[in-house]
């Protein structure tokens, strides 16, 4: 657990150009507050690189490197090797990438990096599409979401994205790395605690963080944290962590709120009707049946 | 608040010859503010504020300054998204239209 009053006042990400209400800004800011100024940062082509490093501005106050899109994991491996060769102590090798840069384009590199067992912390902030280039679908775009490459329309009954979001957390758990977790900006204390655990892990660690995007999802900028909360409460996002060979579910809503209460808040789901809501609800229940059967329930260990 | 300050004396390169000659640059360099993005500005009522740190934690831009006696907002870098006002548990931040105070 992290006491928020002990977090440093110093801002290591400041003056960036992200859209108002961007959850990725909050995520990157808070992670750097936990890892501190002795952080080596790498990020691929993503919203985060576009909004922070526009010459001559550099919004990150830590040494940082813009990696090729597919290579964040490989770059982190290289940085970890350099840290080892230089015998540097007490530094964090941190990678922050989007969902496309992690689950699509960068999957091979991150898989290789964690498999090699380097001491790195890899963070995927998940805004559920390629937002920086204009909202194209990724493999983490949820069912029914309209994007520019999975448009919704009356003609032909296009419902937007036709496939369900893939489970990146389970892909990373399958690597049997020392620490792996999901988090959300809806629960800041949980998020900070997980970052601190990942930072102290002697070996590769991975965080998958749900980060709503006002521009791409179509909601008012002030509601970012509320949308994240609705996703958790409706069961469309789960908070879990994997360590010591077992997965723990950190939070399970007593009763899920209807998915339509989450879906109706966003423009990307506005075209959906009761038929699609049912499909999403059934998929959610299938997913949670698997989760409940395989993972340790919430409450066993205090989050 | 400990944060990079704006370097007002920065000169853009006048010709290709003055461009920096490598891919490296200094970190924490800011040459302009984001204040012009704002349509609504958050105004904090310090009497109602209980200093729970919520706005400071969730602000995407880190524009809440908690170093003084009362919390303050850095209007140079606040983009006016309104998350702080929306989430404030004591409703001590309200959003005011920019320019309403100008006659």
Image (tube, coloured by chain):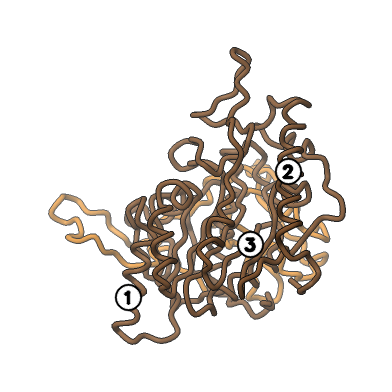
Chain colours: A brown, B orange
At mark 1, the secondary structure is helix
Which residue: 63% across, 64% down? Answer: B64
Decide: few, some or many residues near mark 1? Use Cα within 10 Å; few <14, some 14-19, many ≥20. some
| Marks 3, 2 in one chain | no
> Can you say whether A162 is above or below A252 in the image?
above
Can you tell which of label 2 and label 1 is closer to the viewer? 2
Quickly name the residue at label 3.
B73
Q: Residue farthest to the right?
A: A254
Left or right side of A303 for A171: left
Decide: few, some or many residues near mark 3? Use Cα within 10 Å; few <14, some 14-19, many ≥20. some
Which residue: 60% across, 21% down? Answer: A158
A268 or A275: nearer the viewer: A275
Image coordinates of residue A88 in percent, x first then y, are 36, 85
Decide: few, some or many residues near mark 2? Use Cα within 10 Å; few <14, some 14-19, many ≥20. some
Quickly name the residue at label 2.
A284
Can you tell which of label 3 and label 2 is closer to the viewer? 2
Q: Evaluate whether residue B1 shows in this view.
A: no
Quickly name the residue at label 1.
A81
| Marks 3, 1 in one chain | no
Disc 3 to disc 2, how far (Cα)? 41 Å
């Amino acid at each position: 657990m992290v006491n928020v009053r002990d977090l440093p006042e110093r801002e290591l990400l400041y003056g960036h150009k992200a859209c108002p209400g961007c959850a990725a800004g909050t995520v990157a800011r808070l992670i750097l507050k936990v890892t501190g100024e002795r952080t080596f940062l790498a990020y691929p082509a993503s919203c985060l690189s576009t909004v922070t490093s526009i010459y001559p501005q550099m919004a990150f106050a830590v040494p940082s490197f813009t990696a090729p899109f597919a290579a964040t994991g490989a770059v982190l491996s290289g940085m970890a090797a350099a840290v080892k060769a230089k015998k540097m102590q007490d530094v964090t090798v941190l990678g922050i990438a989007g969902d496309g840069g992690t689950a699509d384009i960068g999957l091979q590199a991150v898989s290789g990096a964690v498999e090699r067992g380097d001491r790195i912390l890899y963070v995927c902030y998940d805004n559920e599409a390629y937002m920086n280039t204009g909202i194209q679908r990724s493999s983490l775009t949820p069912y029914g979401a309209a994007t520019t490459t999975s448009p919704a329309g009356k003609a032909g009954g296009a419902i937007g994205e036709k496939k369900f979001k893939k489970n990146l957390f389970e892909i990373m758990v399958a690597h049997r790395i020392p620490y792996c977790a999901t988090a959300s900006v809806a629960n800041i204390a949980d998020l900070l605690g997980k970052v601190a655990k990942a930072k102290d892990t002697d070996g590769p660690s991975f965080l998958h963080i749900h980060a709503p995007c006002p521009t791409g999802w179509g909601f008012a900028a002030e509601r970012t944290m509320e949308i994240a909360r609705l996703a958790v409460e409706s069961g469309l996002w789960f908070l879990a962590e994997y360590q010591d060979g077992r997965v723990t579910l950190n939070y399970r809503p007593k009763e899920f709120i209807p998915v339509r209460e989450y879906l109706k808040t966003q423009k990307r789901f506005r075209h959906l009707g009761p038929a699609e809501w049912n499909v999403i609800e059934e998929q959610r229940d299938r997913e949670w049946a698997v989760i409940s059967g395989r993972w340790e329930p919430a409450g066993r260990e205090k989050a | 608040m400990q944060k990079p300050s704006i370097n007002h004396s920065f000169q853009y390169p006048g010709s290709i010859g003055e461009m920096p000659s490598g891919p490296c640059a200094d970190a924490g360099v800011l040459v302009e503010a984001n204040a012009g993005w704002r349509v609504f500005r958050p105004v904090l009522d310090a009497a109602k504020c209980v200093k729970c740190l919520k706005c400071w934690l969730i602000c995407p831009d880190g524009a809440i300054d908690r170093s003084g006696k009362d919390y303050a907002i850095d209007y140079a870098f606040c983009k006016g998204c309104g998350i702080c006002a929306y989430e404030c548990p004591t409703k001590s931040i309200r959003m005011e239209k920019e320019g309403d105070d100008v006659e």
